[in-house]
Image: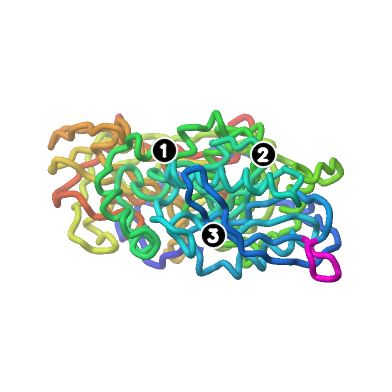
Amino acid sequence: MKTTHSSPSRRTVCALAGAGVLTAALGPARAAAAAGPTPLTDPFFSYDRPARYGVVREDVRVPLRDGGHLAAQLYRPAAPDGKAATGHFPGIVHEFTAYAANLEQFGAAAAYFVRRGYNALVCQTRGSGASPGTVDPFSPQEQRDNYDAIEWLARHPGCTGDIGQMGVSYGGHTSLLVAVNRPPHLKAVIPTNALHDWYENTIYRGGIYSPRIRAWQETTAPATLRTYAEHPLYDDFWRGRSVMTRWDRLTVPTLEINGWYDRYRDGMVKNHLARPENVWLVSGPWDHGDPATQYAGIGPGAYLAWWDRWLGGDPRAPLPAARVTSYEIPGPGAGGGWQQFEQWPPRDSRAVTLALRGDGSLSAAPGPAGEAVFEVNTGTDAPRDDQQLLFGTAAFTRDVVLAGDATATVRAAFTASDGNVAAVLYDVAPDGTRTRITAGWLKASHRLGHSALAPVTPGVRHDLAVHIWPTHYRIAAGHRLVLRVSSDDHPEIASDVPAGRVALAVGARGSSLRLTVRAPNRW
C-alpha cells in the first residue's frame, strides 16, 4: 500500500473540524457503503482441472511480413515419451515482450496451460533478446509483428487455429494493442496491468512528463528518451500507440486484470467503460506485477477457465459471475474485501460535489468567495507547507466508500506562463497519519486537451478539470478525507514549470471536488 506519514498542517487540522458533509449526505445507515464486502466465492476464480501432458520446448523463428523474424520459444503438450503429443491444441501467445531476461520465468508460467492442452508461444519483440532490430515499444511496427506471430501460431500443424494472448505489463500492453488490430485467429485476450493510452497512462500524465518511466526508458528503449521528448503533444505518433483511439475495434472477449495500486488502473477502468459488453474487469489490492504473488492474489485457474471457454470451446467453463469483480481496499481501521458488480461505478454509487472553502474545509456549502495561494517549484521532491493547499472534511461518523474516479475543478491564476496542478486524495486518521488513496495531474496549458496548447495568461483565472484516477476504497468512521493541491508530486510528475505562485479561487464560485461515493438511492 502506498502510504505517507506526514501530518496535515495546523491550519488544516483546524479546518477539518467543519461540517461532516459526506457523512451527513449518507443519511440513515442503510447506505450501501455500510454493508460490508462479500468474500470471493465465484467458481470462476477456483476453476482448475488436472494436468494431462508434459511440456516440450522448441526454440523457433517467427517469420514476419517484411522478411525479418522474431526469436521465440514454443511450448507444446508432450506425450509420456517426451515428444510432442499428437493432435491439435489451441494456442496462447504467452507474453509478447521486450523483457528477454525473464524468458525462463515466462516459460514456467506458460507450462501450467501447456500441461492442460495448450500450445504456448513466448515471443521476444523486435530488437529484444535474440530478435534482430530496434525496440520501439508498442509502435505500429511492433503491433504488426505481434499480428504476424499470432497468425504464424494459428497455422502451426499442431494448432487448432484458435489463439489467445496474455501478459503482464509489457505483455499486457501488447495484448490489448494487437487485439485492436484484429488478427483473424485471435479469439480472446487477458491483459494484466495494461494501458488504454501510452501517452496518458505513462509518459505524459495530464500533459506532464512522468519521471517514473525514465529508468525504464534508459534500460529497455533508450532511443525513446529523445523520441518521446519530440512529441510533448498528443499527435499521430501517440495515436498509433493507443487502444483508446481504436476502442471500437476492441471486440474480442477481454479479461482485464487490474490492481487498485497499479500505475495503469485508470487505463484498465477506461477500457472497461468503453467496451462493457466484452471487457470484464477484475481489480484487486495489487501493485504492478503478477497478482498471484501478492496479497489476495488469483492464480492461473481463472485464466484457464477463460481459455477453456473461448479457445477450448467448453461451455461448461465458467465466466466471472459479474462484469466487475473488485476488492474494496480497506483504509486503516476499516474492513474490506471482494465484491462483484454488473457495472462500474456500482449502480448504487452517486456523485457528490464539495466546495474548497477558504477555511480549508470541504463542504457542500461553499461559503464566502476567497482566494488561497501556494508557491511553485523549488525543486523539492515533496511540497513544503507553503507549496501546497490542504482541504478536508470533518471526521466521518460512519464508513464512506469511494467507488470510481473523481474530478478536482481548480479555478486558478498563475503568475507564470504555465503551471502544473497535482490533486491528491488522502485518508487522514485521528492521529494525523495520512494514507494516500489516489491522485490526478494536469498542466494548465493542456486544460483544453493534449493535442494543442491553450495559452495561460498570468494573473487570469483558468478552470482546470483535473481527472483523479479511480479507486475502490473504504474510509473508516472517525477518519477524514483530505485533498492536497500543489504543483509537485514527484515521481509521478516532473517539476517542469517556472517558479511562481498559484492562486485558487475558493468558496462561492470557486474550486470544487466531485467524488463518486456509494450511497443509498435517495441521495
Residue 185: image tag? 2
Dot placed on the residue nearer the N-terminal end, 3 or 1: 3
Q: Position of residue 474 (x, y in %)?
A: 57, 52
Q: Indicate the quadrant containing the C terminus: top left, top right, bottom left or bottom right.
A: top right
- On screen, residue 430 versus residue 34, left or right, reads left
Residue 434 lies, with reference to residue 493, above or below; the image says: below
Q: SS for tag 1?
A: loop
- Left or right, 43 with respect to 34, comes to right
Q: Are marks 2 and 3 in contact (CB under 8 Å)?
A: no
Residue type marked 2 = His
Q: Which residue is mark 3?
A: 71
Real-space Cα separation, disc 2 to disc 3, in angstroms: 21 Å
**Count of numbered circles on the image:** 3
Q: Is residue 80 magenta?
A: yes
Q: Amino acid at mark 3?
A: Ala
Q: Is residue 378 above or below residue 517?
A: below
The answer to whether residue 39 is seen in the rendering is no
Mark 2 falls on what kind of element? loop
Q: Is residue 148 left or right of residue 305?
A: left
First to last magenta residue range: 77-84
**Residue 125 part of the magenta segment:** no
Q: Which residue is mark 1?
A: 240
Q: CA distance from mark 3 to mark 1?
A: 24 Å
Q: Nearer the viewer, mark 2 or mark 1?
A: 2
Question: What main secondary structure does the magenta stretch of the protein show?
Answer: loop
Pick the residue in front: 303 or 177: 177
Closest to the camera, between mark 2 and mark 3, is 3
Task: Give percent across and percent down for residue 225.
Answer: 29, 55
Out of 130 and 488, give the one closest to the viewer. 130
Examine the rendering and report whether any part of residue 90 can be seen. yes
